[in-house]
Amino acid sequence: MKNLIKNFVIIVASLLLVAALLSFSSLTSEKPEEVGLSALVQKVNNEEVKEVVVEGDILHVTLNDVNAKPLQVKKELGQSFTELLSDYGVAQDKLAKVNVIIKEESGFDHWMSILLPIILPILLIVGIIYFMTRQVQGVNNKAMGFGQTQAKQAKPDDKNKKTFKDIAGAKEAKNEVEEIVDFLKDPKKFTDMGAKIPKGLLLMGAPGTGKTLLAKAIAGEAGVPFFHISGSEFVEMFVGVGASRVRDLFNKAKKAAPAIVFIDEIDAVGRKRGAGLGGSHDEREQTLNQILVEMDGFEPNLGVIVVAATNRPDVLDSALLRPGRFDRRVVIDMPDINDREEILIVHASNKPIGKDVSIHKLAERTPGFSGADLENLLNEAAILTVRREKKIIGESEILESIEKVLLGPEKRSKVMTEKDREMTAYHEAGHAIVGHFLKNCDPVRKVSIIGRGMAGGYTLSMPEKDEYYKTLAKFRDDVAMILGGYATEKLIYGDDQLSTGPSSDLKKATQMARAMVVKYGMSEKLGPRQFGENEEMIFLAQEIHEKKNYSEKVAEVIDAEIDRILDEALQTSVRIIKEHRKQMDELVKHLMEKETIEQEEFRRVMNDGVEEKKDVVVEV
C-alpha cells in the first residue's frame, strides 16, 4: 500500500511538472495575433507585409514593422495563397513584394497532430492502471507467501565459517555433535552396524555458554545444507501460519537431504501444551504439533537432523523430548577454570595482551563467567586501553573490566558527603572483616567505596577454585558476611541511624536463608523435605507460580527457621566485628584515603600476611 501511494504521488507530480513546463513555455513565447483574410489583404495592399509562411491552412505573417506582432491567418484547404489574394483583388506588383514560403506538412506530423490529443490521455490512464495492478499483485504475492518459511540457508563461506577448533572447552558437547557430523559425512560405517541417524539434537545450557556457536561449528563442519531459524519466527498473529512455515521448512530440508535444520530458542514454540489461556487451539500449540509430526509422524522423515537450542529445557513439552524426536540432549555447562583459560586464549589471540597478564590468573578471577562474559571482558579491556591511550592491554585494564562486567562502570563523578563516604566505608569494611575471619567464606579480593552500577560501594570476594556444591557451613558463613554491613552500621551508628544502604543485603540474605529451609532441606526441625513446587504457568504476566504444598502451621515453622538463621548469622557478624574492631577502624581509614584497596593491601591491614585464612569456630 505504501508503494502504491508512493507511485501515485510520483505520477501526479510528473504530470504537474510537465504542465508547468508547457505553460511556462507558452507564456515566454510570443503568441501571434489571429486576424481575418480581409485584414491580411489590406496590409498587403499597403505594403506592410514582409513575409508569409504557408503551412497547410495556416498563414504565418511577418510585418515590416519590427515592433509589430506576427499575424496568423486561417485559409481554406486546397486553395493556394496566390489564388486567394488574386480573388481578393490584390495587384501582382503588390504581391511580388511579399516573400512567400510554402512549408509542406509531412504525413507523420499531420497524423500525429490528429492522434496525439487522443493517444496521450489513453496512455496516461493505462500507465496509472499498470502501476496500480503491479502493486496489488505484489501484495497478493506476499499474502500467498505468508506461510512460507523464513529460514535461511547457511552459505559455505570459508572466511567466516566456524569449526570445532574455534570452540574452546565444552569437550563432551563437541564429542556428541562430532558424531552427528561423522554420520552425515560417512553414514555407511554407521548403517553397517545397524545404527540410525539421530533425528534431533537438543543443546541445553545457560545463556552465553556457546549453544549457537556450537551450531555454527556444526554448519561449518558438516558440509551439508544447513537451514537456521529462530523459534519466534514461526509464531504469528494469524492462525495456522506457524504450522504452514514448519511444513515449508521441512519440505525444503527434505529436498536438500541430507540436511540440518537449526531452531534457535525453541522454547518460544515448544512450551508445554495446555498452559495458556487459548486452550488447545493456541497458535503456538499448533506450531508445536506440526514440529512433532514432521520430526516423527506417520510419514518418515529421512535425512533431516533437527538441532535446537534453549536455556529453558524445563518448560519444553514432554512429547518434544521423547526418543525419536530429540534423541540426544547435550548439556553445555558453565566453563570451569581450564575451559575459561582456553576460551580466554581464543579471544585474546587477536588482541595485544601485555606480558604482565597471566591468563591462568585471569581464569581464576572469573568463576561463574560464561564464554560470552569472557569475550565481553576482553573487549571491555581493549576499549579501556584505547581510552587510556595505551598500545598494550595490561593487567590493570583487565581487572577493572572484570568489575565492570560484574557490577557496572565506576561512578567517580558522584558527589557524596563525608558522612556518606564514612558510612559506606564502615559498611563495606563490615562485609570484608566478617568474610575474612570466617573460614568458609570466599577470599576478599577487593574493597572499594566507589560506586558501581546500583551499588554505592562493594566488597569483591571470589573463590580460589570452582565450587560445584555448597555446604551448610558455607551457607551460614555467607549469610553472616552478607549481614556484616548491616551489623556494622548498627554497632557504629546505633539503631536510630540505620540507613537504607543494607536493603539489598537484607533481601539477598533472606532469599538465601529461605532457600536453605524450603529448597535444600537444611533445617533440623523440618527435616529433609522440599517445600513449594514451582509450576510453569502463564497468567497475567506471572510466568512462575509457586504451588503451596504445606499447611499454615508448617508455614509458621518455615518463617521461624528463616528468622533463626538470620538472627544467628547477625550475632556471628556482631561478634566478629567486636573482636576485630581495631582492624576495622584501620581498614576504614585506608578506604577514606585511597577509596579502593586490593587483596594484598587488605591482608596487610588485617595483619595477616599469609595465604591461609584464620580459622574461626562459629557456634550456630
Image (cartoon, helix red, strand yellow):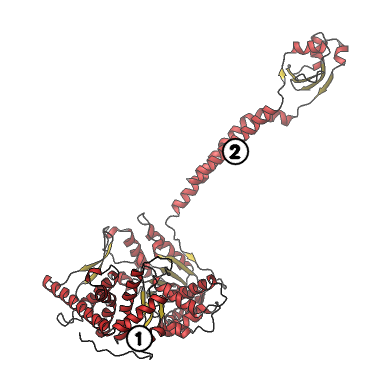
Q: Is residue 447 visible?
A: no
Secondary structure under the numbered disc 2 in the rendered image: helix
Q: Is residue 479 visible?
A: yes
Q: Earlier in the sequence, mark 2 or mark 1?
A: 2
How many other residues sit within 10 Å of disc 1, few (<14), some (14-19) or many (≥20)?
Answer: some
Determine the image quadrant of residue 291: bottom left
**Dot label at residue 180:** none
How many other residues sit within 10 Å of disc 2, few (<14), some (14-19) or many (≥20)?
Answer: few
Mark toward the viewer: 2 or 1: 1
Residue 357, image x and y in percent? 50, 83
Residue picked out by circle 1: 606
Of the pair 471 and 388, the residue shown nearer to us: 388
Residue picked out by circle 2: 14
Q: Is residue 303 left or right of residue 574?
A: right
> Compared to 49, does 255 lie above or below?
below
Amino acid on which disc 1 is placed = Met
Residue 234, image x and y in percent? 39, 61
- Distance between the Cα atoms at labels 2 and 1? 84 Å
Residue 151, image x and y in percent? 46, 63
